[in-house]
Amino acid sequence: MRKHFIRIVPGDHVIVEVSPYDLNRGRIIFRER
């Protein structure tokens, strides 16, 4: 279930929050334009 979908464009600066239990899945918590 995705509450907020952020479109990623190559070149964007993003901060990814990775779950300690599942390193293959990350959550993007911040995006700079």
Image: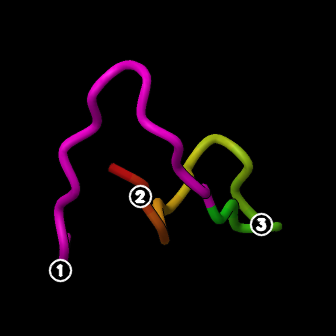
Which residue of the protein is positioned furthest toward the front in this rendering? 33
**Label 2 close to label 3 by CB (< 8 Å):** no
Amino acid at pointer 3 = Tyr
Residue segment shown in magenta: 1-16
- What residue sits 18% from the left and 44% below the top? 7
Residue tagged by mark 2?
31
Dot 3: element? loop
Given residues 3 and 32, the one toward you in this image is: 32
In reply to whether residue 9 is colored magenta, the answer given is: yes
Amino acid at pointer 2 = Arg
Q: For marks 1 and 2, give the CA distance.
A: 16 Å
- What residue sits 69% from the left and 60% below the top? 18
**Label 1 close to label 3 by CB (< 8 Å):** no
Given residues 3 and 9, the one toward you in this image is: 9
Q: Earlier in the sequence, mark 1 or mark 3?
A: 1
Which residue of the protein is positioned furthest toward the right in this rendering? 20
The circle drawn on residue 3 is: 1
Position of the N terminus, as image quadrant, is bottom left
Crowdedness near tag 3: few (<14), some (14–19) or many (≥20) residues, C-alpha within 10 Å = few
Task: Tell me: 26 left or right of 9.
Answer: right
Select label 1 or label 3 by which is in front. Answer: 1
Q: Earlier in the sequence, mark 1 or mark 2?
A: 1
Given residues 20 and 9, the one toward you in this image is: 9
Residue tagged by mark 3?
21
What secondary structure is the magenta-colored segment mainly? loop
